[in-house]
Image (spheres, helix red, strand yellow):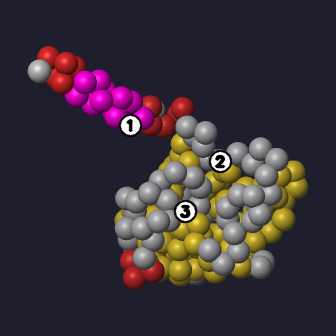
Amino acid sequence: MKKLFTLLAVALLVGTLPALAQADKHERKSPPGEVTTTLNSGATISINYSRPYLKGRTIGKDVEPRDGQVWRTGANEATTFETDKAIRINGKELPAGKYALFTLFQDKSVTLIFNKKWDQWGADGYDMADDQMRVQVKRYTQDPPAEQMTFEVKKDGESALLWGDVRVGFKIDPAK
């Protein structure tokens, strides 16, 4: 009986080690990132995401995003986008709240997807029925490339996702 108890205790400990290892998100290959900015309009924007590195890989071939596929806009959990006030993104209104931020790359355009189900892993649980808003934005080429994925949100609302030689720009304005 003592041996059985010891075996069960060891099995439980070994089974929980991977979960404990993931407890510190800074130890991940794609560490966490956050940008929080209070815009001139008074709205506070927070984007929480995991920041993958390119490491010699090619976007669309070796690493996401891939054209025509919904992407979690980072790594690990879905990226979250939170605003404490209603805002407009490229002219489309987004109510105050917390959203999963997905992207859909197609040729030279990108669709930003603000999904009401913000607490999910990657894009595995993505459901279009939970979309709060979709907005088309432009995709630019940037030089030098960003080795690690980064978001920028400036006080004037000029915002961007930077990843490799891709720059996805969008404008955040106060709601009307």
Identify residue for label 3: 72
Q: Is residue 20 above or below residue 69?
A: above
In the image, which residues are magenta?
7-19
Q: Where residue 70 sits: x, y (%)?
A: 58, 72
The furthest residue to the right: 143
Q: Amino acid at mark 2?
A: Pro
Of the numbered discs 3 and 2, the one sitting upstream in the chain is 2
Helix, strand or loop at mark 1: helix
Pair 2/1: label in front:
1
Q: Quadrant of residue 67?
A: bottom right
Q: Where residue 61 sits: x, y (%)?
A: 77, 63
In this view, the residue in front, 126 or 15, is 15
Q: Residue at x 65, y 47 (%)?
A: 52
Identify residue for label 1: 19
Identify residue for label 2: 52
Q: Where residue 133 sits: x, y (%)?
A: 48, 79
Q: Amino acid at mark 3?
A: Arg
